[in-house]
Image (cartoon, grey):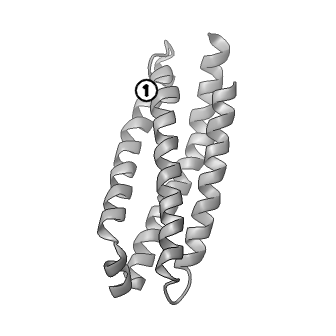
Amino acid sequence: MAELFKLRREHAVILRIVERLDFLVSQPKPPPQLHLFAVRYELTSTLIAHLKNEDWLVYPRLMASTDVDIAATARAFSDEMGGLAEAYREHCQSWDANAIAADWTGYCTDCRSLIDALITRITRENRDLFPMLERVARAA
């Protein structure tokens, strides 16, 4: 299933970007702003495109499944993702260049929480959600 391959590839790309961001926020001092914001921009643009793909390719298909467990799991994942997407949006709005410069430690702490949430989410989707998508595709 080409769609699933694409989604898994996007997860791998997101995780590589997150690794780079995690490295930056593990430093005692902030990196040059242009470097940090380039990584943040790359994560944001990649994540937004991925979420749109999931919204169009994954959730509608799984929620329409006649398997009640699959449909319920997809609804729960979709509801949770809305919260994570909103938290990410708020993080990006709250932490502009001035806020980061004024509180590097606070930014790093907040950023690590967000990174952990993204990694957990991707792990769960790879482990739980994508196999369901494979089952639904095979049954169709």
Q: Nearer the viewer, residue 139 or 43?
A: 43
Q: Is residue 108 left or right of residue 129?
A: left
**With respect to residue 61, does 22 lie above or below?**
below
Identity of the residue furthest to the bottom in this view: 28
- Quarter of the image with the N terminus is top right
Q: Is residue 134 left or right of residue 46?
A: right
Q: Is residue 116 left or right of residue 131?
A: left
**With respect to residue 61, does 99 lie above or below?**
below
- Quarter of the image with the C terminus is top right
Q: Position of residue 17 (x, y in %)?
A: 60, 61
* Amino acid bearing label 1: Ala
| Image quadrant where residue 97 sits | bottom left
Q: Nearer the viewer, residue 3 or 136?
A: 3
Identity of the residue furthest to the front in this view: 34
Sort mark 1 into few (<14), some (14-19) or many (20+) by Cα contacts within 10 Å: some
Q: Residue at x 49, y 85 (%)?
A: 30
Q: Nearer the viewer, residue 101 or 119?
A: 101
| Image quadrant where residue 77 sits | top left
**Residue, disc 1:** 72
Q: Residue at x 62, y 45 (%)?
A: 10
- Dot 1 falls on a residue whose secondary structure is helix
Q: Residue at x 31, y 64 (%)?
A: 93
Q: Position of residue 138 (x, y in %)?
A: 68, 15
Q: Position of residue 6 (x, y in %)?
A: 65, 36
Q: Position of residue 105 (x, y in %)?
A: 41, 84
Q: Residue at x 53, y 83 (%)?
A: 31
